[in-house]
Image: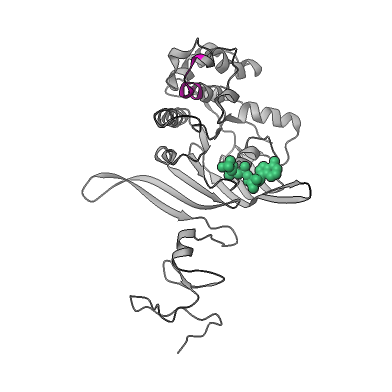
Amino acid sequence: MTTTTASTTTDHGGVAPVREYSGPDIWCEDLVRIYSTEGVEVQALQGLNLVVDPGDVVALVGASGSGKSTLLGILSGLDRPTGGKARVAGVDLLTMNRAQRVDYQRHVVGFVWQQTSRNLLPFLTAADNVALPMVISSRKERGGRVAELLDLLGVADCADRRPAQLSGGQQQRVAIATALANSPSVLLADEPTGELDDAASEQVLEAMRSAAGELGTTVLVVTHDPTVSDHVRRTVQIRDGRTSTEVLRERVVGEDGVERLVAREYTVIDRAGRIQLPQAYVRELGLHDRVRIEKEPTHVQVWPDDQEHHLPANGGTRPPTTDGEEER
Ligand SMILES: Nc1ncnc2c1ncn2[C@@H]1O[C@H](COP(=O)(O)OP(=O)(O)OP(=O)(O)O)[C@@H](O)[C@H]1O
């Protein structure tokens, strides 16, 4: 197992994780998690695939019960998958022993929870909360790092206050600083703005994005908050325990020389070639039971089963019937 315990100084002066492995920071393949309670089985993850590259900031969205928290529980090392493969920063989550798990949670991943009270110790000041993970890891030169992180999250003026003396947004920003204290490769956040109003959510998300960018930390944030999407390059939708669609945002300069933010939606395709069509398309086109597909030079068309009345507007060929013969 490879762990990340070293660190390096960034331009900003902050300490960034040193990656002693190559490849993605989060890698899940066919991940399955089945809960069994009183003889009833719930398949919370049903063959989930996810790859997140180092330094990427990704929002994970999805309906209640779709499996978001289950995935985060596994990635944080608190829970074990029933099947499949999962690696974070090169660490195999399925083969970790107890000691390795403790090391993993101290150095490889940092977490921020929704409940502000769960993230910070109430009797310590903000500065002491941020210092605590470094004390536990016997890390030296803590003072400078604490000040740097609080500054990076925009809460330097809160250093000497206890959590009860901070607003909810300030508490979450101190919580992010605490989660980043030991220079984890990956920051996991479960609904970090769930208890905040819009303005505070905005500030927390922006602070998290910029701090992670400065430090080179990979971020996976689970959220119901639609404004989160404005702060991340990539949004992954999870449906029925699988990643289904993704939205990628990038800045593109148009022919008029004006820079625009372009969002493109993608559907995830797994190794077996399976895709999940967006529910709105399925509904609107009345797709059910089976569909016909037709390969074009650059793309694939999907047709409802009954195509008699829906020949392509461009006069293209009718898709083949299921036995491969052209209809006359
Ligand atoms: N400990 C558990 N025991 C049994 N079933 C569970 C357990 N934890 C989660 N589940 C079930 O697994 C499925 C996925 O739950 P999960 O909490 O991961 O969803 P979620 O997307 O995070 O939902 P929410 O947005 O409401 O937090 C649900 O059907 C849930 O009822």
Image-quadrant location for residue 272: bottom right
Q: Position of residue 260 (x, y in %)?
A: 29, 45
Q: Position of residue 217 (x, y in %)?
A: 51, 32
Residue 68 visible from this viewpoint: no
Residue 190 visible from this viewpoint: yes
Quick one: quadrant of the C terminus?
bottom left
Residue farthest to the left? 256
* Residue at image location 45% in from the left, 44% down from the top: 234
Residue 118's place in the image compared with 163, above or below, is: below
User: In the image shown, does 9 or 154 lie closer to the viewer?
Assistant: 154
Display colour scheme: one colour
In the shown orientation, is residue 97 left or right of residue 283? right
Which stretch is magenta? Answer: 165-173
Residue 62's place in the image compared with 128, above or below, is: below
Residue 129's place in the image compared with 311, above or below, is: above
87 falls in the magenta region: no
Q: Position of residue 40 (x, y in %)?
A: 75, 51
| Quadrant field for ligand 1 | top right
Residue farthest to the bottom? 328
* Residue at image location 45% in from the left, 62% down from the top: 281
Q: Position of residue 101 (x, y in %)?
A: 70, 32
Q: How many marks?
A: 0
In the shown orientation, is residue 39 left or right of residue 126? right
Magenta-colored segment: predominant secondary structure: helix
171 falls in the magenta region: yes
Residue farthest to the right? 39
